[in-house]
Amino acid sequence: MCGIFGYVNYYVQRSRSEIVDTVLNGLARLEYRGYDSAGLAIDGDKPDEVLLFKEVGKVAALRKLYASSKINNDRLFDSHVAIAHTRWATHGRPSPINAHPHRSDPNNEFVIVHNGIITNYLALKALLTSKGFVFESDTDTECIAKLCKYVYDLNKDSARPLDFTALAKLVLRELQGSYGLLIKSVHYPDEIIATRKGSPLLIGIKTEQKLKVDFVDVEFPELPDITVANNIPTITTPESAGLSNLTVPHLMTSNLLMPMDGSDLRRSQSRAFISEEGTPMNAEFFLASDPASIIEHTKKVLYLEDDDIAHIYDGELHIHRVRREAGEPAIRSIQTLEMELNEIMKGSFDHFMQKEIFEQPESIINTMRGRIDFEKKTVTLGGLSSYLGTIRRCRRIIMIACGTSYHSCMATRAIFEELTEIPTTVELASDFLDRRSPVFRDDTCIFVSQSGETADSMLALQYCAERGALTVGIVNSVGSSISRQTNCGVHINAGPEIGVASTKAYTSQYVALVMMALLLSDDSISKYERRTSIIDGLSKISSQVEEVLKLNDTIRGIAETDLAQQKSLLLLGRGYQHATALEGALKIKEISYMHSEGVLAGELKHGVLALVDATMPIIFLATHDSLFPKVMSAVEQVIARSGNPIILCNKGESALSKLGKTYRTLEIPQTVDCLQGLLNVIPLQLMSYWLAVKKGYDVDFPRNLAKAVTVE
Ligand code: AGP
């Protein structure tokens, strides 16, 4: 998905090549999110000159383009603003012209990078075109840059010049949709605007001197805000008549002028950034859509909230809002990131996905660390403690997620119902929203997401919150939108997951959900034995995962010699193993581009059996649980049709001997039924990995996919 990186140096002298390296390295750290083109904007050598570099393909291609430009790399800048972007095409194919930064005009007076979608861009484009602007790209984003210039030009001759914040406020109120946005302009040299609505954005701060306070005050207008002052009804453009979402609320000349009674935003000082002597300190700021791109520079970060307008100038960071809602916090904390640089490096592994598969013995432990007391058989989840009573009393639990995260919900739904005795449903976020499913105040809605930024899950979260349900987040990315917008939750602590194919996040989500079910049922005497056996199972699970990983070479062999040439693959399981089959199939599709289907084994005879013959590759998840006899019956049906399945079974499974010799096995250690999926999924993750490697595909960056899917 799109990535944003910006760099501001204030009286920290940097050469142009250092600045460009910083932004290109920042973009490279965002590569794992998936993108198809990249670009950057920096200052030129002439006054008021901004240079744009944009290229299709990898950041390396952009680096090459820049290197070929013969620009003076040694030029020194005491202060400077650079912005950069990796684009994942939504409006318009990947091309240099559609890549960001987008500009207001051929002189690059305003340049912007944007994540998200502007839903009323057609109306804005039509109006700006009628005002003489010539659009060059197919994107929704370009209208923001042009709107900046339009507003600037309207106000430039007024008695009081428009400062950058005031300009941003006027521009933002015209935009509908979602954005993470950086704006740079020749009219505001060495200043930057960073703002977000529904798309993540954070600011890393690096100063030599210690910050005076570890927060930034939020600045609210002292006088009625420009948005309120201009109480103009929404105007629908002729072009968009009938389309309620294509409106431009104030885009009439008179309404884009700064009112004379607007607050003087330059009056304030940002307390954190003032030195002992009372002057601003030398500082560097790193603006990014993802903390992974800034931790090599600083661990001090400030996460912007929706509708925050951050304005950096003269070494100070200011946060503005257009109005103050009751009870709204008046500060934004500067936090310390816990992430380490080596966590986002590949180390000795060939791919991030491979590294993350092999990290699972440790990531699972990290999910449980400090939360399970294996001796006392208790679970503590601090993030839920104030809400346990509410959840225990709720009418039903709805788990909502997408993709792999949805599968972790599927994998744990049964144990949730068994232990909590609360009806539990599992929903795909997009389908849940499409159906406008009824949600009530006494529902508990659990949102499971690795990134915490998935648009469908976020929209479902807003939908449930509006209806008064309790919202719980099970999230990996600390500081992400879902983790901040839910009432309570659990961080899965799997560490950064870079590979687009989710692996360690799946097993950690699974463990976090099981822990939640254990916690919710710890007041039930009748569940004591069952809970104890699950907690005992969890105490051994990490070493069992290590044991399964020893199958790596065997699985590689199967992938390379038996499966790589195949067109299709069926994975069959039932009960707890249905989710494993679905997740294995998704992994295989996603990175090896091979059609694979996870099938509930009980459904075999209702249609899928027609596909079975001696050539159809089939994997059975036939580890031991109460449904094992039924799975075996499905295995027999396949073998009776000349099928040659691979059977994933527990070590020394004797029931297979009656099947003859037309199958192979992958033997997995046995654990408690509801945890078995944690072990069974690992051979499937490895299989997808080796299939993709064998086919020569880009394992960490599968085609057409992104790590964080921040568009609907
Ligand atoms: C997993 O391998 C996929 N890349 C994808 O299905 C992913 O799980 C899904 O997009 C949800 O993402 P999230 O967990 O970040 O919300």
Image (cartoon, rainbow, N blue to C red):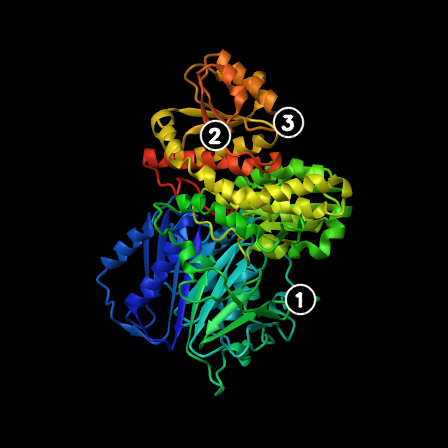
Q: Earlier in the sequence, mark 3 or mark 2?
A: 3
Measure how far apart labels 3 and 2 are at the Cα level: 18 Å
Could one spot residue 111 in this view of the protein? no
Measure how far apart labels 2 and 1 are at the Cα level: 56 Å
Q: Is residue 96 above or below residue 614?
A: below
Q: Quadrant of the C terminus?
A: top right
Element marked by disc 1 = loop
Q: Earlier in the sequence, mark 1 or mark 3?
A: 1
Q: Which mark is residue 667?
A: 2
- Three-letter code for the amino acid on which mark 2 is drawn: Glu
- Three-letter code for the amino acid on which mark 1 is drawn: Glu
Q: Is residue 631 above or below residue 511?
A: above
- Three-letter code for the amino acid on which mark 3 is drawn: Ser
- Look at mark 1 in the image and give the residue it sits on: 328
- Spot the residue most to the bottom: 277
Q: Residue 597 appears at what percent x and percent y?
A: 50, 27
